[in-house]
Image (cartoon, rainbow, N blue to C red):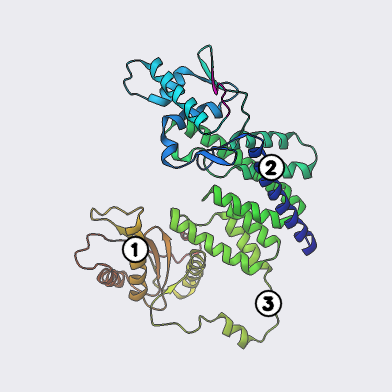
Amino acid sequence: MNRNSSRQAEKTADAAEGKRVAEMESKEENHILYVQMFGSFSLTWKGKPLIGASKSNETQFAYLMQQLLHNRENGVSREQLGQILFGDRDVSDLNHAMRSVIYNAKKKLKAAGMPDVNYIEQRKGVCFWTKEIPVQEDASEMERLCQEAREEEDPRQKLELYLEACHCYTGEFLGFQASSIWAARESRRYRRLFCSCVEEAVRLLRENEDYYRMEKIGLYAAKVNPLADWETVTMEALVGMEKDEEAVRFYDDTVELYLQEQGLRPSDRLLELLNKLGTRIEHQYEVLDLIQMQLTEGEVQGSGGYECSYPVFQGVYRMVERMMERGGQSVYLMLCTVVDSKGNPMKDGAVLSELSERLKESIRQSVRRGDAFTRYGKGQYLVLLINTTRENCKILQRRINERFVVRRQRTGVQYHVNSVACTPQGDRLP
């Protein structure tokens, strides 16, 4: 896609967002009750919040409104409402307690400035939200747009509907109520629906080579549904727009994010896109001496091992493996893991982040300049020790411990060491 097309796509996307905001404002002026279920729960009437603070989301009034407004068509049975409002509490007169909650809810809605109508109607043991006050709920709006997109035959209009549906989703459905069975069930359903909308939108954008909006939807999806590999969409868009340097930086940031948050390595798809980028990069014609200057590490402050990203470490490991076929060097792979006072690997927390950083520095200062190391997961590092012995590995462990353990520290480091195979079919680095 050329630059003019890219600028036009940017204007179109901005115009669509402006239209969506204007429509929301217009609906508020037209006395429509706006309900937010994604990310957090809130009610807005005439531009003013009726409910929205975190504490007010955990009241009987909030639970009642969530049920009635989300189930506007079919209503909610009194039995179901009673279970949600009172749970397993021993209530002597459930009907009286229910009437009291509903009565107080009506008083609160009227006091908030809403029209004096029968907000909660009861028919044959089922409670309904009144049809006299129109409601716009982000969850049902997303479903409506997604269904329209599926039925739409015009590819351009289909794309716009899918994108609009995606932007309705601003986070987990009632994510703060993870312990609620019905909320958790709906959360999973809407997450699947969001993923489906994003995938369809990306497919259409890819066909149009509209990489600008493809990048935008990739970034948005990763924001509202984090650690779900949506970064591959953004990476593909950057590669498609030939933003090579930006793509490499984005890849490095993504690898670091996944390692920090979940101790995970990048997906195969992300690695595939990086390889595609690497085969395409071309440099200006230069003499060997200048090229060699660019390849060298440059001035290194102090001594210590070579710290690198996991993909680079993987490449170094495989290269060393091949070199061993000819040279017969003794090479070892060491995994260092931060453990608690009972010897169990630590999983999360600020303390782990601090200890992980200290372990990194302890490794850097303990290994030789010719050894490489990388972060593998939360509180874990891999070290590749070149031309050494198993006895020297034990000496290295003692050096790391001397730098890592301070005062009466009860945490420590657990070590696992394997010899690197020197055959072409040897075990590969996972």
Circle 2 or circle 3, nearest the eye? 2
Q: Which residue corresponds to mark 1? A: 354
Type of amino acid at the residue the image marks with label 2:
Glu
| Residue at 68% across, 41% down | 26
Type of amino acid at the residue the image marks with label 3:
His
> Bounds of the magenta span?
115-121
* Percent coordinates x, y for residue 126 in the rendering: 52, 16
Earlier residue among tags 2 and 3:
2
279 shown above or below 213: below
- Near mark 1 (Cα within 10 A), the count class, few <14, some 14-19 or many ≥20, is few
Q: Quadrant of residue 33?
A: top right
Type of amino acid at the residue the image marks with label 1:
Glu
Q: Which residue corresponds to mark 2? A: 23
Q: Which residue corresponds to mark 3? A: 283
Residue 116 on the magenta segment? yes
* Percent coordinates x, y for residue 367 in the rendering: 35, 74
| Residue at 52% across, 36% down | 188
| Residue at 75% across, 53% down | 12
Taking the image as shown, residue 289 lies to the left or right of residue 175, namely: right
